[in-house]
């Protein structure tokens, strides 16, 4: 069954009110706990800290309930804080401080970002690619029709068909497969693209059998196997989320791979042609009508579903990779003339530009840097490239954290995960790191780990300790160990969000949207659509972004309030369909 979405599904859920009163159930639980607490005070001094923990949880009404799937795992009483562990926390704070990104540096970052944006609009070969997309109009929610979209950009390949209802809602049917690791670094592009075409065929068979059968019949009865009636041909939007030198709405050559992909033979080739060739080999009734970056798709999708009249300014991805696309004045995209791209509609005076902000400041003139960032970059497949992305996006945060944790394990003053007293004190079980722990493997630490750690608000950090055991084979970590890890996670996550704010704010300022246009509040909103696991799942990511916005004088509190950020979940699929529609319309006229 297709899922029907409406604009309401795309707003970030409202924050929990900090003034929520106690519910009667909570009051009752509190009373029971206080009685138990009193009994324990007189009976068992060793249980004091446990009871205190529970009471303090109920005291914090904003905290979500702790998630602990195996509550018995940490039944043993907590180790008490020891003097040597004090130095662990001091060391953890020292490492965490290396990730601080103060307001002064942040403002320098905004200025540099605006400069590099301008440079990219004028010439090719600059740090930020500022790729013209040849999409000159954003959608307004009235578009209709059935379109196909595929999405290649990270760990999964998605195929979907989208029915646009023309009233800001749409239905989507989709399937998703993991891309086999060996195909990400295949010898030839054919290996990857034939796999993609095969997935499209499977999808059509499963969900649009009528079209598929009509095509089989035609193949058997007519001499030209590809001679479909145009009504039978699916227009497909191809979301390809890598830097592409785009020269037309469905034409573009791959500039370079990112996010761990590396198939040299594809670089410099037109990716739409590569996909179309494999689709034709299978005789599918599908035309690759549009080439779309996921940030561009997100912008289009947000524009389609966004409430009110205000057009969307920016689409941004904070997932495996990071990127942004925004609406720019055509007259500012001065390099268009030298690009000799295909013709496009100039009537709106605007064009969506794919910034490829992942490569902002590859020259490292203003980006923050730590030894962990440096080592990560040196040992990556593309050293010196995507330097902004390597500090912001999901693919890299886990790896930065892994390296920072290893530093604390090696640091004699910190001794993370080493319970020296376990032999002397029977209350403690021995803390151990398995030899094959993911901590010792490059890319071994998934960014979802950061989200789980950041979300743990239990006062003994039992979820962190449970996850350390489950994901990283670190057994019997102490509460101090968990606290040290949490300090690192918060620092890395916060820096990522503040850097994200630099990019978003720079675009608001560079396009003049920091200045209020006056008029009603709704006319004055600056609308942004965002997607990706970080912004969706990392607790407080948007709050950190907003805090950073307020520290930028051009925005300050007033500007921050005017910015509306909405999740455009899986927006790139819908966006690709919308761009395929724009392309098909342009084809007809
Ligand atoms: C790619 C972009 C993409 C972003 C988010 C980056 O690595 O270069 O094209 O939009 O990831 O998926």
Image (cartoon, helix red, strand yellow):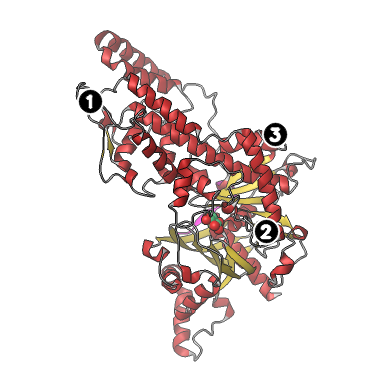
Q: Residue at x 50, y 62 (%)?
A: 257
Q: Looking at the picture, how far across and down is residue 223, in whole percent?
A: 49, 91
Looking at the rendering, which quadrant does residue 580 occupy?
Answer: bottom right
Mark 1 close to ligand 1, CB under 8 Å: no
Above or below residue 489? Residue 571 is below
Q: Earlier in the sequence, mark 2 or mark 1?
A: 2
Q: Residue furthest top?
A: 42
Q: Looking at the picture, how far across and down is residue 426, in whole percent?
A: 19, 22
Which residue lies under the disc numbered 1?
422
Residue 7 shown in magenta: yes
Of badges 2 and 1, nearer the viewer stands: 1
Which residue lies under the disc numbered 2?
352
Of badges 1 and 3, nearer the viewer stands: 1
The range drawn in magenta is 1-9
In which of the image's four quarters is ligand 1 placed?
Answer: bottom right
- Estimate how packed mark 3 is, as few (under 14), some (14 to 19) or many (20 or more) residues with alpha carbons within 10 Å: some
Which residue lies under the disc numbered 3?
556
Q: Give the camera-side residue of 8 and 388.
A: 388
């Amino acid at each position: 069954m297709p899922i029907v979405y409406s604009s309401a599904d795309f707003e970030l859920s409202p924050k929990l009110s900090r003034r929520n009163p106690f519910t009667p159930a909570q009051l009752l639980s509190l009373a029971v706990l206080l009685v138990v607490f009193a009994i324990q005070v007189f009976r068992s001094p060793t249980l004091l800290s446990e009871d205190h923990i529970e009471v303090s949880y109920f005291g914090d009404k904003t905290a979500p309930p702790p998630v602990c799937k195996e509550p018995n795992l940490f039944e043993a009483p907590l180790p008490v804080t020891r003097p040597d562990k004090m130095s662990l926390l001091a060391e953890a704070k020292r490492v965490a401080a290396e990730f601080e990104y103060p307001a002064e540096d942040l403002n320098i970052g905004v200025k540099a970002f605006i400069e590099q944006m301008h440079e990219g609009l004028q010439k090719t070969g600059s740090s930020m690619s500022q790729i013209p997309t040849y999409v000159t109009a954003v959608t307004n929610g009235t578009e209709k029709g059935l379109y196909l979209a595929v999405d290649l950009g990270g760990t999964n390949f998605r195929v979907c068909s989208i029915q646009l209802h023309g009233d800001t809602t749409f239905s989507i049917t989709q399937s998703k497969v993991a891309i086999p690791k060996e195909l990400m670094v295949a010898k030839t592009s054919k290996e990857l693209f034939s796999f993609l075409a095969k997935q499209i065929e499977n999808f059509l068979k499963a969900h649009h059998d009528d079209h598929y059968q009509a095509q089989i019949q035609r193949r058997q009865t007519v001499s030209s196997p590809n001679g479909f009636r145009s009504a039978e041909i699916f227009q497909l939007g191809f979301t390809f989320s890598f830097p592409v030198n785009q020269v037309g709405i469905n034409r573009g050559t791959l500039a370079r791979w990112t996010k761990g992909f590396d198939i040299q033979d594809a670089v410099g080739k037109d990716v739409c042609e590569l996909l179309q060739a494999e689709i034709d080999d299978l005789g599918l009734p599908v035309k690759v009508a549009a080439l779309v970056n996921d940030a561009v798709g997100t912008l289009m999708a947000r524009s389609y579903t966004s409430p009110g009249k205000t057009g969307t300014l920016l689409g941004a991805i904070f997932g495996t990779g990071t990127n942004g696309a925004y609406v720019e004045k055509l007259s500012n995209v001065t390099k268009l003339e030298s690009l000799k791209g295909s013709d496009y509609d100039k009537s709106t005076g605007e064009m969506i530009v794919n910034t490829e902000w992942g490569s902002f400041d590859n020259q490292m003139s203003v980006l923050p840097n730590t030894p962990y960032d440096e080592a990560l970059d040196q040992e990556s497949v593309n050293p010196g490239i995507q330097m902004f992305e390597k500090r912001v996006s999901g693919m890299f945060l886990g790896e930065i954290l892994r390296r920072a944790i290893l530093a604390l394990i090696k640091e004699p003053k910190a001794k993370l995960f080493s319970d020296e007293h376990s032999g002397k004190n029977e209350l403690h079980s021995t803390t151990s790191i398995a030899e094959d722990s993911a901590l010792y493997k490059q890319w071994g630490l998934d960014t979802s780990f950061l989200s789980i750690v950041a979300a743990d608000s239990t006062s003994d950090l039992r979820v962190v300790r449970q996850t350390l055991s489950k994901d990283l084979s670190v057994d019997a970590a102490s509460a101090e160990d968990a606290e040290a890890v949490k300090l690192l996670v918060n620092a890395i996550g916060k820096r990522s969000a503040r850097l994200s704010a630099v990019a978003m704010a720079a675009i608001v300022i560079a396009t003049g949207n920091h200045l209020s246009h006056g008029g009603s509040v709704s006319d004055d909103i600056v609308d942004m659509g965002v997607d990706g696991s970080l912004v969706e799942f990392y607790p407080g990511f948007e709050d950190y972004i907003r805090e950073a916005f307020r520290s930028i004088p051009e925005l300050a509190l007033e500007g921050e309030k005017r910015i509306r950020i909405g999740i455009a979940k899986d927006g790139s699929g819908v966006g690709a369909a919308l761009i395929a529609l724009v392309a098909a319309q342009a084809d007809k006229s």
